[in-house]
Every structure is written in structure tokens, then in C-alpha cells.
């Protein structure tokens, strides 16, 4: 059993931000992606150069947003049996993509349900 668990839904669409805070970490959905995986970046929120003042603020930028220093990035596939294990700043994490659905604007926009656990 993990000591800490966070669940989050990330919606990547033209009207939303593709990230969520999970504890003191920032998880951002990036490309590439498909119907069964997404690429994510995870890093400490303290390395983020700018977060909107309100969760619904939308930032339009030619660069991936939010701008932070990811300490782990990779593809996460849908399914409990596809959990990805990684280490950040001396802690062990387990990231599961529980659900991946086409977003409100159609593919490539997506809605992702994640579970992040820390030992």
C-alpha cells in the first residue's frame, strides 16, 4: 500500500490547461498521444516558471505549457496493469492512466484520469 495517493483528471483541449498539481508535483500531458497512451512530464511545482492565478485561466503559447523542469517524462498506457514506476528527488512513484477518452473537441484532444502513488 502506498503512503500517499492522488487522483486527477487532466483535460487537454483548446479551452483547458493540460496539467494538474498532485501533491507537490506537476503532471502535464504532452504529445505524442494515441487512443491508448499519452506522453506526460512530471516535476516539482517549484520549478514552474508560471502558473495561472486561476485554475481555469487559459494560456496560449507557442511553447508547451506549463513551463517547468520535468524530472521524469515518458509514455503512460491505459490500464491498471500498465503502471509506470519512476523516482523523483529520492521518492518512488507509481503512475497509472486509469482512463483515456477523446476530449470535448475530438481527437487529438483528450481527457485522462490518473492515479499517482508515492511510497
Image: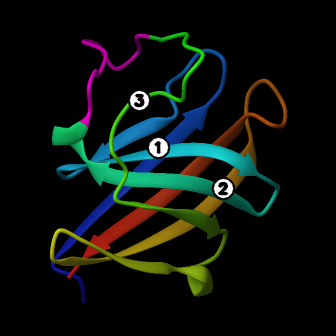
Q: Is the residue marked by circle 2 packed among few (<14), some (14-19), or many (20+) residues within 10 Å? A: many
**Is 37 placed left or right of 82 in the picture?**
right
Q: Position of residue 16 (x, y in %)?
A: 54, 21
Task: Determine the image quadrant of residue 107.
Answer: top right
Q: Look at mark 2 in the image and give the residue it sits on.
A: 38
- Tell me what residue is drawn at x 19 percent, y 52 percent: 23
Residue at the image position 17 percent from the left and 68 percent from the top: 89
Q: Earlier in the sequence, mark 3 or mark 2?
A: 2
Q: Is residue 111 above or below residue 95?
A: above
Q: Residue 74, image x and y in percent?
A: 56, 64
Color theme of the render: rainbow
The percent position of residue 47, horizontal first and vertical second, equals 22, 39
Residue 41 position (above or below residue 73) = above
Q: Which mark is residue 51?
A: none
Position above or below: 47 against 24: above
Q: Quadrant of the N terminus?
A: bottom left
Instruction: Please report contact status of discs 3 and 2: CB closer than 8 Å, yes or no.
Output: no
Residue at 67% across, 69% down? 78
Magenta part of the chain = 48-57
- Quadrant in which residue 117 is drawn: bottom left
Is mark 3 in CB contact (under 8 Å) with mark 1? Answer: yes
Query: Mark number for residue 66?
Result: 3
- Marks 2 and 1 sit apart, C-alpha to C-alpha, by 10 Å
Instruction: Residue at 41% x, 49% y: name it.
Output: 8
Question: What's the mark number on residue 28?
Answer: 1
- In what element is the residue under mark 1? strand
Q: CA distance from mark 3 to mark 1?
A: 7 Å
Predominant SS along the magenta part = loop
The x, y position of residue 94, in whole percent, is: 38, 77
Determine the CA span between mark 3 and mark 2.
Answer: 17 Å
User: In the rendered view, does 12 fall on the left or right side of 1?
Assistant: right
Amino acid at each position: 500500500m502506498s503512503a500517499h495517493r492522488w487522483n486527477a483528471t487532466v483535460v487537454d483541449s483548446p479551452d483547458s490547461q493540460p496539467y494538474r498539481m498532485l501533491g507537490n508535483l506537476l503532471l502535464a500531458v504532452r504529445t505524442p498521444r494515441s487512443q491508448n497512451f499519452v506522453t506526460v512530464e512530471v516535476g516539482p511545482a517549484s520549478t514552474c516558471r508560471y502558473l495561472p492565478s486561476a485554475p481555469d485561466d487559459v494560456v496560449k503559447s507557442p511553447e508547451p505549457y506549463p513551463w517547468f523542469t520535468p524530472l521524469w517524462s515518458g509514455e503512460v498506457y491505459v490500464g491498471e496493469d500498465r503502471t509506470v514506476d519512476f523516482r523523483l528527488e529520492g521518492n518512488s512513484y507509481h503512475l497509472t492512466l486509469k482512463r483515456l477518452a477523446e476530449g470535448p473537441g475530438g481527437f487529438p484532444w483528450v481527457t485522462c484520469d490518473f492515479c499517482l502513488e508515492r511510497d
